[in-house]
Amino acid sequence: MNRDSSSLNNKHFDLLICGGGIYGAWTAYDAALRGLSVAIVEQGDWASATSSASSKLIHGGLRYLESFDFKLVKKALTERQMLLEAAPHRVWPLRFGVPVYADSRIGSLQLKAGLSLYDFFAGGPGAEMAHRHFNRDEFAARFPALNDTGSHGGYTYADAQTDDARLVLELIDGALAAGAVCVNYCKLTSLLETDGLASGAMLHDQIGGAEAKVHARQIVYTTGLWTAAEKEGHEWCRLSKGVHLLMPAVLNDEALLLTAPSDGRVFFMIPWYGLTLVGTTDTDYQGDIDHVAVEKADVAYLLAAANHYLKHAWTAADVIGSYAGVRVMKRSDAASPSAVSRDWELKTTGDGVHHSVGGKITSSREDATHIVDAVCEQLGVHAPCATKGKYFPWAPQEDFGVWCSAMNAQAAHLGVDGESAKWLLRRHGKHTGEIFRLIEAAPQLAERIVPDLPFIRADLLWSARNEMAVHLDDLLRRRMPLLILAKLNESELRRLAEMVAPELGWDEATLNQEVGRATPDTAGKARPTVNHINRQESCDG
């Protein structure tokens, strides 16, 4: 993946997309596969807003059954199954436990009915994905960190997990391979009009400073929360902030779906890169969209909710990292954001520009097909969706199980530990072999970057060379999420910056700037510029 802003200037495209999160990435990929000439620009890094601040889930949304949003659940579950098959390296099954206590808001029979309905909407899954019941002792054995006082056992059911930022990156790479021009750190500054209709845009390269004029027959905004900053968007959107915490490991290979005792909201505890991801909050947001921050009240809410269930309570000192994102939902008068539908819609303004509003990571592919359908209709192009069921760009072509076994054996031979190898395959798919070749040439690159986390030095080096990273926090927050998984001090950040500086062409002054940009203000809390520096989508899973 190479960044080439010069490929934009004074060029003509069928479609220009503004916003490089999950909706923009899917739209660019689908449109390019259909044969359209496509450009996508993102004024920050790919997935640097809420598309890298989700719960990392590909799921149907079990909680939406309570609000009878059956259409959304079925849509999301259909996509979940398709993604599990088309991208086994990127989307993998994850079982969730749901404990039942004497004072649970939803009793065992009601929960079983809901899980049965969930399985039904998933198309009657096989034994691997179907829900199961466990008595008190069995459930406690599966989730030993939970307090079992008053326990009536519980259930497990299946959904799926991903790394959201890398999902976006892979789709951008797929769009590039299909002929799209994809440029991050490139800001759309104004639209050009012909006879009252948008016909192009002026762009500003945020790295080199150059201005570019682009001609486009159709324009789509997939700018997420920044849509709400526009006059029309304010009338379309409701914003909700979601916060997640990274906590010490208390789970094995299964997650938990729990209910916060203070307000009855569902939240998750999820194993992620060897730690525990806890979230999310869901509160109306009317603050600065350029600086979405984790507040003390957000941390207190999540800790209290988690500690209600844990045998050994967490404190604020246990928080390893945190992040916040703002979801965009359709305008609603519902009292609570949790009651607002997560479904998606496409708006088109009088100048012919299309605006993506709302949505979820899980169903973003299908929603993007409707965006491209609308674009094709306006262009008079007859080309069907090209992404459904298509193997992902980085998916290995051979049998996935056989491929995994062979790659794990090669990793062990090269001295890569098993956990790091597992995440390498998930993060890079078929490119993992290229990372192995780096290790063959320099065996020390098989070492972990941080002893307790499954990231190796070869991974960082390869990402710096090949994944369109511009800044250090691009590498350490989105190419690999070290900034939220570890409390890195300035000297540790400098060591990593020095490792990649030759690849990114940094001199000493630039290296110092990059270390400063990525240095946390306080332990576990990164500068806003790390996580929220650009326009793009906001979605939960």
Image (cartoon, rainbow, N blue to C red):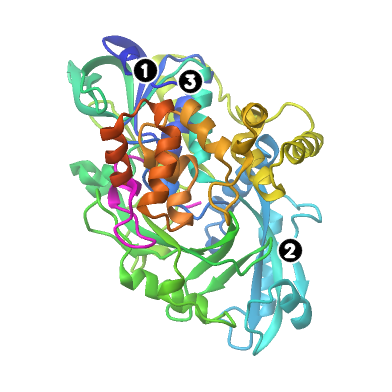
Residue 20 as seen in the image, left or right of residue 196: right
Residue denoted by label 3: 176
- Mark nearest the camera among 2 and 3 is 3
Q: Amino acid at mark 1?
A: Asp
Precedes in sequence: disc 1 or disc 3: 1
Instruction: Give the numbered dot on residue 74.
Output: none
Residue 463 highlighted magenta (yes or no): no
Q: Is residue 475 above or below residue 137?
A: above
Q: Main SS of the magenta segment?
A: loop
Q: Quadrant of residue 107?
A: bottom right
Residue 5 versus residue 160: which sits nearer the camera? 5
Marks 2 and 3, Cα distance to the nearest angstrom? 40 Å
Residue denoted by label 1: 4
Residue at image position (64%, 26%) is 441
Q: Position of residue 417 (x, y in %)?
A: 70, 47
SS for callout 2: loop
Q: Amino acid at mark 2?
A: His
Residue 61 versus residue 508: which sits nearer the camera? 508
- Mark nearest the camera among 1 and 2 is 1
